Image (tube, coloured by chain):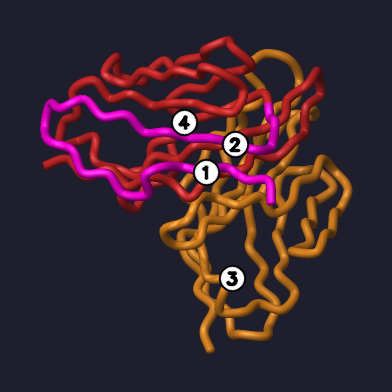
Chain colours: A red, B orange
């Protein structure tokens, strides 16, 4: 089945140690998103790629970066994780071609990041 | 995007219909209403969306009032697996970065045996 895959499902990193989370998709969707979801809160969009174009949310800290080497893969890099970055990180995709676009987003299962 | 208001929690008996309300009084004419749900420890899942007509699919029905200021998601026969946080999201569809979803606090639906 076509899907959004996130690896690993659980990641433990040390305070200040760079960490990379990965996302891949077999849906051939042109848009990929990264959300952060802290405990008991709603998902919050960090940034997204429309094709190769990177779109950062205004309030996303510089500590968070992303790479999309090809259509299928997208990475979330946290350069210096702090304790406040512990959260579930969700990757999502959608097919947005032209306007109006009414395609739903498909979410992966998430990676739960623990910072020690 | 217009903001939405949902009750923080609701209960429903298994096998009964679950009716989840959402207020979006500032919705614009070109904004769609989307519903997603998130089961514990999983990613959100799309349920249904609509503009002004009522919509139905294999998961749920969406009833939008004539003035479009509110909507109701209906799960016709709730099961224990429908226990989740349900998010009502209003999303503009014209131009710009219109693919973004802005999640509110949602409604925690608990289906009881």
Residue at 50% across, 50% down? B43
Disc 3: which residue: B82
Mark nearest the camera among 2 and 4 is 2
Left of A102 or right of it: where is A92?
left
Question: What secondary structure is found at the residue carrying circle 2?
Answer: strand
Q: Which of the numbered marks, if any, corresponds to residue A5? A: 1
Magenta region = A1-29
Q: Residues within 10 Å of mark 4 (few under 14, many from 20)?
A: many
Between the C-alphas of marks 1 and 2, the distance is: 6 Å
Chain letter for mark 4: A
Q: CA distance from mark 3 to mark 1?
A: 23 Å
Can you tell which mark lies on residue A115? none
Tell me the CA gap for discs 3 and 4. Answer: 25 Å
Q: Which image quadrant for residue B27? A: top right
Q: Are marks 2 and 4 on the same chain?
A: yes
Q: Is residue A84 magenta?
A: no
Q: Residues within 10 Å of mark 3 (few under 14, many from 20)?
A: some
Disc 2 to disc 3, C-alpha distance = 26 Å
What is the C-alpha distance between the residues marked 2 and 4? Answer: 13 Å
In the rendered image, the vertical position of residue A100 relative to residue A116, given as above or below: above
Q: Are marks 4 and 1 on the same chain?
A: yes
Residue behind mark 2: A25
Which type of secondary structure does the marked residue at label 3 adopt?
A: helix
Say whether residue A114 is left or right of residue A103.
left
Q: Closer to the N terminus: mark 4 or mark 1?
A: 1
């Amino acid at each position: 089945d076509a899907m959004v895959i996130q690896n690993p499902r659980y990641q433990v990193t040390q305070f200040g140690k760079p960490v990379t989370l990965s996302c891949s998709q077999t849906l051939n969707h042109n848009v990929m998103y990264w959300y952060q979801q802290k405990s008991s809160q709603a998902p919050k969009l960090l940034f997204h790629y429309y094709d190769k174009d990177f779109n950062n949310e205004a309030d996303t800290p510089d500590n968070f970066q992303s790479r999309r080497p090809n259509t299928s893969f997208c990475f979330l890099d946290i350069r210096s994780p702090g304790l406040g970055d512990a959260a579930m990180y969700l990757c999502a995709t959608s097919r947005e071609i032209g306007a109006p676009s009414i395609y739903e987003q498909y979410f992966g299962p998430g990676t739960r990041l623990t910072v020690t | 995007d217009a903001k939405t208001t949902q009750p923080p929690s609701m209960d429903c008996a298994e096998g009964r219909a679950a009716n989840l309300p959402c207020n979006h009084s500032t919705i614009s004419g070109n904004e769609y209403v989307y519903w997603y749900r998130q089961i514990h420890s999983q990613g959100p899942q799309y349920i249904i969306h609509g503009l002004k007509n009522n919509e139905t699919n294999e998961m749920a029905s969406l009833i939008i009032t004539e003035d479009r200021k509110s909507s109701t998601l209906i799960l016709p026969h709730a099961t224990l697996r429908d226990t989740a946080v349900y998010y009502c999201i209003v999303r503009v569809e014209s131009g710009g970065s219109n693919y973004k979803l802005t999640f509110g606090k949602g409604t925690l639906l608990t289906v009881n045996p």
